[in-house]
Amino acid sequence: MRRKLVIGNWKMNGNLAANASLLAGISAGLSAGAADCAVCAPAPYLAQCQAALTGTPVGWGAQDMSAHASGAYTGEVSAAMLVDFASRYVILGHSERRAYHLESSELVAKKTVAALAAGLIPVVCIGETLAEREAGQTNAVVGAQLGAVLEAISTADVARLVLAYEPVWAIGTGKTATPEMAQEVHAALRAQLAQANAAAAPAVQILYGGSMKPDNAKELMAQPDIDGGLIGGAALKATDFLAIIHAAA
Ligand code: PEP
């Protein structure tokens, strides 16, 4: 039985004061039996997350990291640096990184290998654009994005992945994939995972992301292969984020 997991992607939002109240609101509002949850904060605030969340059920992590271990890579943050602040998760291959920083699936795969080597849980994001969906290419696009990662990691490490299916046209737009649309892709991704490691695939958490809100979360997460959510906008308000976490339970 897969546990539900809800992760907040803060993107480039927040400041010390706003984060303090958001983190306090989330940890104070969690009721017993809530789904697993975490926030992925901008790297400068990982120390704040560690201080505020240690000893609570809320995990934390980052939104990206370097594929390199250390060295002359100005501006980059390594996996080991994330681990120094007890990060559990790292989002990799978010569509905003793929679009604005031209990250290829091969680079995302290298980052995934580096994250796993450091003991982090990579939350690998995959998803098609509207043009790709309209051209009937959804399964081919997400299959290629996942395929690059599966080629780079060991068979055993399939069990250590978290995937996030995030249709690009649904991110930050208020448009959500219907539960059936999302389920279809999630099932295809799980079948692809099973080809790589049949024993591990049924346990891999596949999150949905793209305008998940308190009013649509329950319906989406009721689908058999939707194991939680990667939440952008609604993760910035404690009451909304909590409502989604409780909808997942
Ligand atoms: C995201 O950034 O991963 C995301 C899903 O954003 P939103 O929930 O705002 O669509």
Image: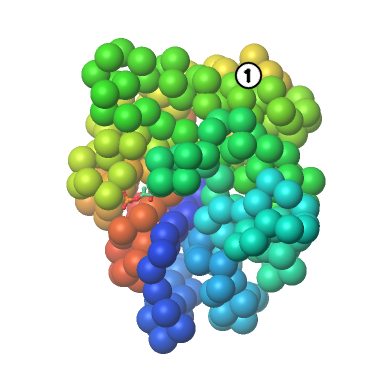
* Residue 221 against residue 75 in the figure, above or below: above
Res. 60 in view: yes
Residue 49 as seen in the image, left or right of residue 208: right
Task: Give the x, y percent position of residue 158.
Answer: 69, 31
Query: At x 69% / y 70%, what residue is drawn?
Result: 85
User: Is label 1's Cβ within 8 Å of ligand 1?
Assistant: no
* Residue 48 against residue 213 in the figure, above or below: below
- Residue situated in front as seen by the camera: 221 or 128: 128
Res. 33 in view: no
Q: How is the image coloured?
A: rainbow
Query: At x 46% / y 24%, what residue is drawn?
Result: 142
The quadrant of the rendering that contains the N terminus is top right
Residue 91 as seen in the image, left or right of residue 218: right
- Report the residue marked by disc 1: 194
Q: Quadrant of residue 151?
A: top right
Task: Give the x, y percent position of residue 33.
Answer: 50, 59
Query: At x 24% / y 18%, what residue is drawn?
Result: 134
Task: Give the x, y percent position of residue 26.
Answer: 43, 72
* Residue 170 against residue 105 in the figure, above or below: below
Task: Give the x, y percent position of residue 182.
Answer: 35, 29
